[in-house]
Amino acid sequence: MTVKDKLVQKPRSLYLFNDMVMLVQPVKKMFRKRFQCEGFVPLESAQIVDIIDQESQVQHGFQVLPSDNPDASLTILCDSEGSKDQWMTDIFEASFILWEEDQMRVGKVVPPSSSSAAGS
């Protein structure tokens, strides 16, 4: 996977957690492979934006934009359209689950198990 930082494309690893997307860079230290965090976007404020493929410029790309700080966006370039679709779907679903849990916590959404039990 590649991340576009300004005009430079850099190979990086992207990790999806239940509450954030984290970008890391592999760093070799004394025969051990370690990772250094280069940035993250909290999913509670994230927007996923598809980048339409352009000839010879951006292929299989999308952006993860934090709504509270658009300058801290991540531009992700995947190896294939399928990989891009899977990443975008996974990030969207994780973001939605986080939003839904937050809504249940404040009582705005009734959990599905509660509504089915009430109908029985």
Image: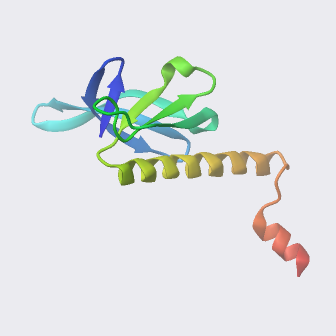
Residue extending farthest to the left is 31
Percent from the top left, x then y, of residue 75?
A: 41, 30
Question: How many numbered marks does the figure carry?
Answer: 0
Percent from the top left, x then y, of residue 92?
A: 56, 47
Q: Is residue 15 placed above or below 67 in the rendered structure?
A: below
Q: Is residue 39 placed above or below 88 in the rendered structure?
A: above
For residue 6, what is the image quadrant? top left
The residue at 82%/54% (across/down) is 109
The residue at 54%/29% (across/down) is 65
Q: Nearer the viewer, residue 71 or 105?
A: 71
Q: How is the image coloured?
A: rainbow
Q: Quadrant of the C terminus?
A: bottom right
Judged left or right of residue 61, residue 30 is: left
Q: Nearer the viewer, residue 39 or 50?
A: 50
Q: Quadrant of the N terminus?
A: top left
Q: Is residue 5 placed above or below 17 in the rendered structure?
A: above
Percent from the top left, x then y, of residue 31?
A: 9, 36
Judged left or right of residue 101, residue 52 is: left
Percent from the top left, x then y, of residue 44?
A: 63, 37
The residue at 33%/42% (across/down) is 78
The residue at 26%/28% (across/down) is 10
Residue extending farthest to the right is 119
Residue extending farthest to the front is 55
Judged left or right of residue 66, residue 104 is: right
